[in-house]
Image (spheres, rainbow, N blue to C red):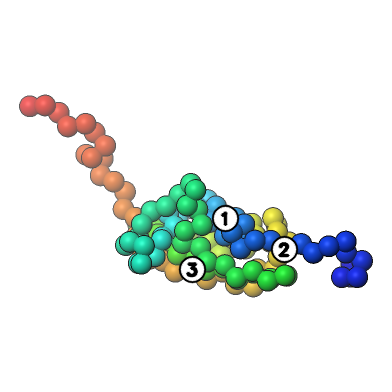
Amino acid sequence: MSAENQPGMIRISDDVVATIAGLAALETQGVAAMSGGISEGLAKRLSGKNVQKGVSVEVGQLEAAIDLRVIVHYGSIIQSVCRSLQENVKEAVENMTGLNVVEVNVKVEGVAFKEEEAEEVPARIK
């Protein structure tokens, strides 16, 4: 459809794209959390309302570029996790917005270790 036949302009907010990208990132196997960056604290774990943390986007009329800062689970193959992350985020943003995602850059800022089982078991009184 040519621009002359369209009844108006559609603009998708950077926040919308960042939210979609953040949710898709958190659903990727091997990703423990999003990172708020060094300036916001060393590998600060965020979720829920703060899903946009660790996500930077540049959105144009037809294209988007996305930068992600993540923490991966210890033992994961980082290259594989990052490739899956790039594919999942690209697919989610393109499917939901119709924008062409030209790049998804990933920076791994930390590794999450499983909490020791001893910490989860209540201390026994001697």
Relative to residue 106, is residue 3 drawn left or right? right
- Of badges 2 and 1, the one in the foreground is 2
- The residue where tag 3 is placed is 106
Residue at 48 percent of width and 46 percent of height: 48
Q: Are marks 3 and 2 in contact (CB under 8 Å)?
A: no
Q: Is residue 55 left or right of residue 63?
A: left
Label 3, label 2: how far apart the Cα atoms are: 25 Å
Task: Identify the residue at image location x=92%, y=66%.
Answer: 5
- In terms of secondary structure, where does tag 2 sit? loop
Residue 2 pos. (x, y %): 89, 70
Of badges 3 and 2, nearer the viewer stands 2
Q: Secondary structure at mark 1?
A: helix
Q: Earlier in the sequence, mark 2 or mark 1?
A: 2
Residue 11 marker: 2
Q: Which residue is mark 1?
A: 19
The 10 Å Cα crowd at callout 1, few under 14, some 14 to 19, many 20 or more, is some
Q: Residue at x 46, y 62 (%)?
A: 54
Task: Decide which of tag 3 and tag 1 comes sooner along the chain.
Answer: 1
